Each structure stands twice: as C-alpha cells, then as structure tokens.
Image (spheres, rainbow, N blue to C red):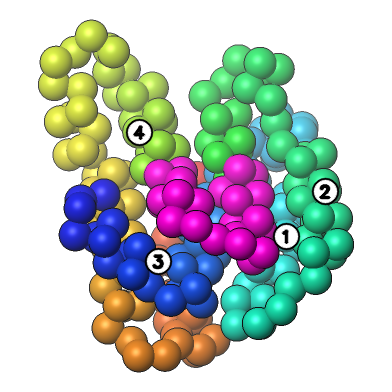
Amino acid sequence: MDRDNLIALKNLSFEKKLTFAYLTCERLFGNYVFFSNNFNFGSPDKLKNAIMFLHDNLFEIHHEKQTIEKIVKQVEKITPDTEDFSTIYVSSALDACTCSLDSLDALLEMDFSTIENISAYGFDTVDMYVREIEEINANDKLADKKINLHHLMQKEVSIQQGIITFLKNRKNIDYADVETLLQLQDNNKRSNLDL
C-alpha cells in the first residue's frame, strides 16, 4: 500500500478502521472455506461466527472482553498450522484466521500496527498465491513487478484503496455504508484469490 493510503488509513476513526478490518476478513473468508472443504480441516461456521461478531460490534462503544476472548479461543482452535499441510492453500487459510484474530483484538484496543497488519494480510495472501500459480522464482529480479501487475494483486490494491477513499470521504458511517462497501468488494461470493 502506498504511503498516502497508509496515512489516510491511520487517520480514520476507530469505527472506520474496524470497518476496514471487517471487510478484509470477509474478503479472506472464502480462502478458509476453500481450504477447509478441500483438506478436511477446521470449521468455516466458527470463523464466520467470529467475523459476524466483529460486524455486529463495529459501532459499539464497549466490548465485553470475556466474550471476545472466548471467540478468539474458538478461532485459534480452527487455525491451521502451516507445518501440518503441504499445500499453498494453508497459508491463505492461516491469513484468514489471523486477520480475524487481529480484528477481534482490535475491538478492545487498536493501535495502527494492528490495522496495518490487517491490510497486509490481504496483500500477503495474494503475493504468496501468485508466486505459486505463476511459478515465480524467488531469485527473479522482476518477481515483485510481476506480482504487482497480476490481476489479483491489482484487484486487492484497488479494493483497499477504494475502501479507504470511501471511508475517508464520509463524515460518519453506518451499517448501510458497510453494506455498500461489501457489495463493492463482492467477487461473485469468491475470495480475493477467486476461490
């Protein structure tokens, strides 16, 4: 993400940062579903419940720490370990869980590094996937350029920039705005990897 968008993201209100986090969780969720369905691991329903809890608490002032900690433990139990699988899809499933975990933690206390990490999960998931499907060698001097020009990365950049611009230009937001942003990032119900 370029410096201007990072600054804009940093300057958003708490509710707008949470909205950005929630939308990222939604984009990555399909990656977890794909992994879970194809490798018989985890529980998409439990991860979706965590994401919906985040959604339902975007505009709440106080958050019950014990409830959040309980949901965090449920997500941790369904988070895959990359050492246990030999498929590239485990990394994208891990990113989906970690993004949700960081977003839940943000309900209690958000510093900018948290929201910056959440943004990075979207990019890192695409980066790793594109390297694999396009067979981009780590020693390739043009690797970063090839990845940045790939349509999946272009789409992720565009979506994140669009969300930040939308949020920055709104004085206040509500659930109607969240729904609009969900529709704008909708990918025919597929993830940011087109899964």
Label 3 near label 1: C-beta < 8 Å? Answer: no
The answer to whether residue 190 is magenta is no
Badge 4 density bin: few <14, some 14–19, many ≥20, Cα 10 Å: many
Q: Position of residue 189 (x, y in %)?
A: 51, 61
Which comes sooner in the sequence, label 4 or label 2?
A: 2
- The segment highlighted magenta reads 97-121
Q: Position of residue 26 (x, y in %)?
A: 55, 60
Residue 188 versus residue 167: which sits nearer the camera? Answer: 167
Under circle 2, the secondary element is helix
Real-space Cα separation, disc 1 to disc 2, in angstroms = 9 Å
- Which residue in the structure is indicated by mark 1? 50
Under circle 1, the secondary element is helix
- Which residue in the structure is indicated by mark 3? 185
- In front of the other: label 4 or label 2? 2
Residue 66 versus residue 72: which sits nearer the camera? Answer: 66
Asked if residue 50 is positioned above or below residue 15 in the image, the reply reads above
The answer to whether residue 104 is magenta is yes
Label 3 near label 2: C-beta < 8 Å? Answer: no
Badge 3 density bin: few <14, some 14–19, many ≥20, Cα 10 Å: many
